[in-house]
Image (cartoon, rainbow, N blue to C red):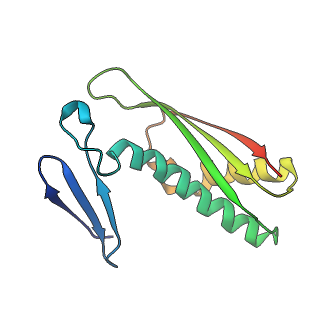
Amino acid sequence: MELTLKRIESPFVLELKNETGNTCSIDASPAIGGKDKGFRPMELLAGSLASCASIDVIQILKKKRIELGCYEVKINAERADAVPSPFVSIDLTFVFYNTIERSVVDSIIQMALHKYCSVSASLDNAISINYTIEFKA
């Protein structure tokens, strides 16, 4: 994996680019001079966890031949009030817009988070990663 991070505007507006040319804007908090022109690094990290787990959930559902309709994950992350301020907990709410047996979904999310997700495996074990499941019509 090769990525390039380039400052595109002073003081903290950055652009992350991957090998295929996709880009993502990153910025710092306005409290330290950021301009709210991109994601903050910790937002990207929490979003990466949800994305990685979601890709695994979707793949497992597909292998089980379970049709997935609309789907989303709500992320609520808490950070320590210190410097540095790492995550203390990340709560994920997996929202499914079709009917899938709850026990099946629970098992799949467990596998995704604890067996297959590379982001989860890369995070400090001190971070409490919790999830809930919602079904909506």
Name the residue at the left extreme. Answer: 10
Q: Where does residue 37 sit, x and y in percent of width and height?
A: 29, 51
Look at the picture and state if 96 lies above or below 21: above
Q: Where does residue 62 sit, x and y in percent of width and height?
A: 74, 71
Look at the picture and state if 99 lies above or below 132: below
Quadrant of res 100: bottom right
Q: Nearer the viewer, residue 117 or 84?
A: 84
Task: Pick the quarter of the image with the N terminus.
Answer: bottom left
Look at the picture and state if 65 lies above or below 87: below
Q: Where does residue 115 sit, x and y in percent of width and height?
A: 61, 53
Name the residue at the top extreme. Answer: 81
Q: Would residue 71 appear left or right of 50 to someone viewing this image?
A: right
Picture residue at 78% right of the left edge, 52% below the top: 105
Q: Would residue 92 appear left or right of 36 to someone viewing this image?
A: right
Quadrant of res 74: top right
Picture residue at 31% right of the left edge, 77% below the top: 21
Picture residue at 74% right of the left edge, 43% below the top: 133
Q: Where does residue 36 sit, x and y in percent of width and height?
A: 30, 45
